[in-house]
Amino acid sequence: MRFSGNNNPAKCFSSGSLVLLLAALLAVAACGPSGPAPDTIYHNAKVVTVNSGFDFAQAVAIHADTFVAIGGNKEILALAGPETDVVDLGGRTVLPGLIDAHAHPEKASLSEKEMPLDNPRTVAQCLDWITRMTASRQSGQWIIHDKLFATRLAELRPPSLAELDSVAPDNPVFLDGSYGGSINSAAMRASAITNEMDNPGLLRDPDTGRLNGQIRFTAFKLLKLPAPPQYSIAERAEALQLMLGRYNAVGFTSYTSGGMSLADTLLYQYMRGNDMLSARVFINIYNPVKFMGRSAGEVQQNLHALKVSTGHGDKWIRIGALKNVIDGGILTGTAWLREPWGPKARELFGVTDPQYRGIPRMGEQDFYAFARAGAGEGWKVTAHVTGGAGVDMMLDVFERVNEEIPVAPLRCSFIHGNFFTAQAIERSARLNIIADAQPAWFYKDADAMLHILGPERIKTFHPYKSLIEAGVVVSAGSDHMVILDDMESINPYSPWLAMWSMITRTTERGTVIVPEEALTREQALRCYTTNNAYASFEEELKGSIEPGKLADMIVIDRDYLSCPLEEIKDTQVLRTVVDGRTVYEK
């Protein structure tokens, strides 16, 4: 039942298709004299169901937490009872609630609690932020930017040691880029780091041989950082509640938490008990048992003792995948690549070895023990992996596991992945390994990767179309970690910006990169709805607007499917409904 070219929902509802009409008739029986009337009816809308046929409707009926009928205005309005709240949407577009496949709102919600963070685009803006922070700090107090990436600065370089020292001579500075970063001389003094130290994680000026302020994650432990602030569970819950409100405001009704310990999931239980949740969560669990150097059997025994695995929970809180970390990051030159990083990595990342391919965090045997044990206990297995060599190693392990335990039903995934050759895509499709992609990384980082790796290797960077056409499920997420705002956060979490970038292959610098990998609007929308529901084993519960599914939906201010392409990224959410109740209204 599809709309014609006419966008007036009162005129373009076709009765030729039986799919949604049958659903509506079944709902009439369910909500007739022997059943309850809907609590809410939304009508006079363009309802994009994102069901298997990508059908359209005009109205939806909700009872309690469930969609009970979807169809034309007349038949859905006929279901109304005296207490039904009937809402005329004035022709607006309705979509299923969006799902972020990978976010860290727990961390993000607290990221600006102690001091505001900027998202600088240039070295000068970065130095200006440090200057402002020194004015509010006593001498000797640390200034830390949690997630600043030099490759996202216009100059494609970090601030120099001299520049950092000029704006903060007496305050230790640490610009943390997750898997690499920058420190100033005051930070070296505070941490007793000297030029005489022999640590490969402390980088040096190639001409003088002296430390240049650049540091890799392998040397982070040398930094004598102040203890992080401690918050009560009530304070953490209040901050996260506000963060989820921001997610609701851009259209998210569910998300996957990128990684927590099992103990930290108590935060969500606390919020559930205090009616503070406005979005559903699938929580990835960082390796909860020791596995390095152990056999798969021993690791599995320890996992079994936890009495929990993927899928445990309810419609609000579910245990997600078992998560590990394979390598570093593309923005610090520590991702584990198939080929050497190359000559341009020398000036940007301080790479001196021409054969340097990045830093693997574990070998194949250790990851096999982890993955085999997880599969044996029914866990979905995943890992942070940012380079192609890490992707290939994970596939080697999944193929080994598959000889003993079928891997496809587990819906295992690569978190990030980034670089997929044709062979890796074929193997991923065969094993049903999900590509947990971050379109914001393409938007922010494809220019830098093109500059560093060249025009041939960039063809394997975020090849969305090739993945989907081969049968790989692409789930889209933000990896939101720092800063509250949806567009100014270090990894922007606006799904509209992300979908626009997936459709146009356009970067923040305005470059169109490998346009042949562009998605259609429908494909991009599925990456934030049905695909993400599938990734969390919840495709029967959410991801589309269908009778019997949870009543999660959004109303937006334009027709996503037909508005001018450039306007997609500016889409505004007017209403967000979760579990049948409005949690956000503009």
Image (cartoon, helix red, strand yellow):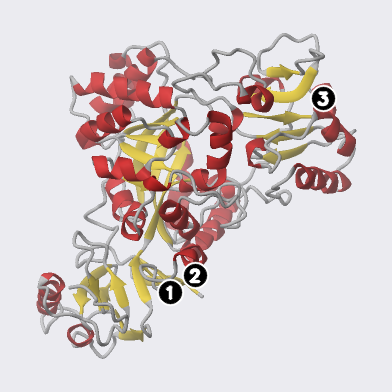
| Label 3: element kind | helix
- The mark that comes first in sequence, 2 or 3, is 3
Q: Nearer the viewer, mark 3 or mark 1?
A: 1
- The mark that comes first in sequence, 3 or 1, is 3
Residue 110 in percent (x, y) is at 62, 49
Q: Nearer the viewer, mark 2 or mark 3?
A: 2
- Residue occupied by mark 1: 558
Residue 190 marker: 3
Q: What residue type is disc 1 on?
A: Arg
* Horizontal arrangement in the rendering, residue 38 relative to residue 337 (left or right): left
Query: For the residue carrying disc 1, how many other residues have a C-alpha within 10 Å: few (<14), some (14-19), or many (20+)?
Result: many
Residue 572 marker: 2
Residue drawn at (31%, 38%) of the image: 434
Query: For the residue carrying disc 3, how many other residues have a C-alpha within 10 Å: few (<14), some (14-19), or many (20+)?
Result: some
Q: Nearer the viewer, mark 2 or mark 1?
A: 1
Query: For the residue carrying disc 2, how many other residues have a C-alpha within 10 Å: few (<14), some (14-19), or many (20+)?
Result: some
